[in-house]
Image: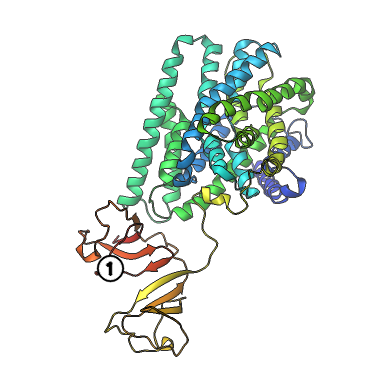
Amino acid sequence: MASYVLIIACVILLCVLAEKFSDKFGMPALILFMFIGMLFGSDGIFKIPFDNFVLAENICAIALLFIMFYGGFNTNWPVARKVAGKSIVLSTAGVVVTAVITAFLCYFVLHISLIESFLIGAVLSSTDAASVFAILRKKKLALIDGTDSVLEVESGSNDPVSYMLTVIALGFMSAGQSGNVAITVIQQVLFGVIIGVLLAKLVILVLIKTKLVSEGLDTIFIIAAVLGCFGINSLLGGNTYLSIYLFGIIAGNSKIQNKQNLIPFFDGVTSLAQISIFFLIGILSFPHLMPAIMPKALAIVIFLTIIARPVAVFGLMLPFKCSARQCLLVSWAGLRGASSVVFAITAVAQDISIKQDLYHIVFMVSLFSVSIQGTLLPAVARKLGMVDEKSDVRKTFNDYQEETALQLMRMHIPAGHSWENKKIRDVNMPTGSLAVMIKRGNETVITKGDTEIFGGDDIILSVPPYEPSGQDQLEERSISKTGPWCDKAIGELDIPEDMLIAMIVRDDETVIPDGKTVLRENDTVVMYRQA
C-alpha cells in the first residue's frame, strides 16, 4: 500500500514540475502529463502493467465531471451571453456535422466499417475544454470579436453531444437498437436539463437562504452536489455532462457567498483531474502498438483538421456574419484531447467487439492535435490578426479581478458632522484609506494634513478593495431606467428592515449613501442583509 501511495505522490510531483516547465519545452503541459504516464506504463521505464479500462473509465468519468463543472462555474455568463448563439450552434450542430463527415471519410477512404467509423467520429467530434482553457489562460490569449468566449463556451458545452453520439453508436454495436435513438436523445436531453437546473437552484437556495451549511464546508457541499448530479443522471438516464455543465453555469453566475474562495479551490481540483486523466491516458497506452495505427491516426487528424472541422465551422458561423479569419481560427482551435480519449475508454470498457484499435487511434489523434494544433494556436491567432493585445482573456472567467490595489470612495460631510471644521490629520480615517482630494462646490482641493474640512464637502478617499470574509451577506442590484428604484431617494424605498444599502457604485466612484441620496440609472447598489 505504501509503495502505491509513494508512486502516486511522485506522479503528482512530476506533473506539477511539468506544468512549471512546460513553456521551456514548447508544448502544452497536458502533453507532458501524458508522456509521464507513458514512462510509468508497460512499455515505459517503470513498466507498471495497467490495462483495466473499466477502472480507468470510472476514474476518468469523475475527473471529467469536475472539469465540466468548473468550465461552467468559472464562465462569466454576462460576457459569454453575447456569443452564446454561435457557441451553442457549434457545440450541438457543429459536433454532429463533424462526427458525420469524419465517419464518412473513415468509411470511404480508410475502409473502416460504417458503424465503427461512426463511433470514431462520435468520440472525436468534441473539442477539449481542458486543453482550450489551459492554452488560452497560460498564453493570456485574448481574442477579438469575442472569439475567446466562443471557444470557451463551445469547448465547455460540446462534450454532452459527443457523449450522446458515443452512446448511440455503442447502442447500435451492442444490440442494433436503431429504434431507440430518438428515445435515447430525448431522455438524455430532458433529464440532463431538468436535473442540472433543479440541482443548481437547490444548491443556490441552500447556500443563500439557509444556514444548513457551516462556514468552510461549502466546498464539500458542492462536491457532494456534483457527485449527486452524476448519480441521479446515471440512474435516470440523463446526460451527465450536459447536466453538470448547466449546474456549473447557473451556480457560478449566482450570488452564492464565498464564490471567490470556491473558484481557486475548484481550480485546484480541476488541475488534479486533468493530471489524473492525462496520466491514465499515458499509462494505458502501449507505444509498441502505435506504429501500426499511425497512418490511420494521421489520416483522421487530417480529416478533422482540414476538412470536417472547417466545414462545420464555416457552414455554421458564416450565417452569423463571422469573418473568414475568425472561422479559420475557430477551426484551428478545435483541439481533441481528454474528453475524446475518455469517451474512447468508455467504448473499450464495454463488452462489445471493436475490430479497430479505437483507444490508440484516438490517443494518437489527441496527441497530434494538442501537441501540434495546441502549440501553434498562439502563432496562428497572431498570424490571422485575431489577438486583442489591449484586453485580458481572464475577463471571460468568473475569477477575474482588476489588477488594482485601491479604489476611490466618495464620503459626503454634511453640516454638523463630527469632522466639520477639523483638519485632515485630526480625523480618524477608515483603516487603510487616504484622503486624495475634496470636492467643494465647483472647486477641487488637493488635500494635505492641515487641510480643513467644511460642511458640505465631498472627500474622495483612496481605499483598499473590499474582500468578503465569507460571513457577510452582500447583494448587488443594478438600477435600470425602468426599474422601481430609479430617480428615488433611499428614504422613499420600501426595503426590508434587515437590509441596509451600504454603498453605491456610480461610474468610477463609490458613494456612501444616506436617506436623501437619489439612485440614478446605471448605479450599482450594494446591499447588506443581516445574517
Which of 469/113 is in front? 113
Question: Is 209 placed above or below 516 here?
Answer: above
**Residue 324 at what x, y percent from top left?**
61, 34
Residue at the image position 35 percent from the left and 79 percent from the top: 441
Q: What is the basis of the colouring in this image?
A: rainbow
Which of 97/75 is in front? 97
Residue at the image position 58 percent from the left and 18 percent from the top: 100
Q: Is residue 479 visible?
A: yes
**Residue 67 at what x, y percent from top left?**
54, 40
Q: Which residue is mark 1?
A: 517
Judged left or right of residue 141, residue 482 is left
Q: Which amino acid is tagged 1? A: Thr
Within 10 Å of disc 1 (Cα), the crowding (few <14, some 14-19, many 20+) is: some
Question: Is 441 placed above or below 152 here?
Answer: below
Residue at the image position 61 percent from the left and 29 percent from the top: 340
Residue at the image position 73 percent from the left and 50 percent from the top: 21
Which of 445/234 is in front? 445
Judged left or right of residue 89, residue 501 is left
Q: Quadrant of the N terminus?
A: top right
Which quarter of the picture shows residue 166?
Answer: top right
Residue most extreme to the front: 442
Q: Quadrant of the C terminus?
A: bottom left
Q: Is residue 283 visible?
A: no
Which quarter of the picture shows residue 425?
Answer: bottom left
Total tally of numbered discs in the picture: 1
Judged from the image, the secondary structure of the residue bearing numbered disc 1 is: loop
Which of 110/191 is in front? 110
**Residue 150 at what x, y percent from top left?**
54, 39
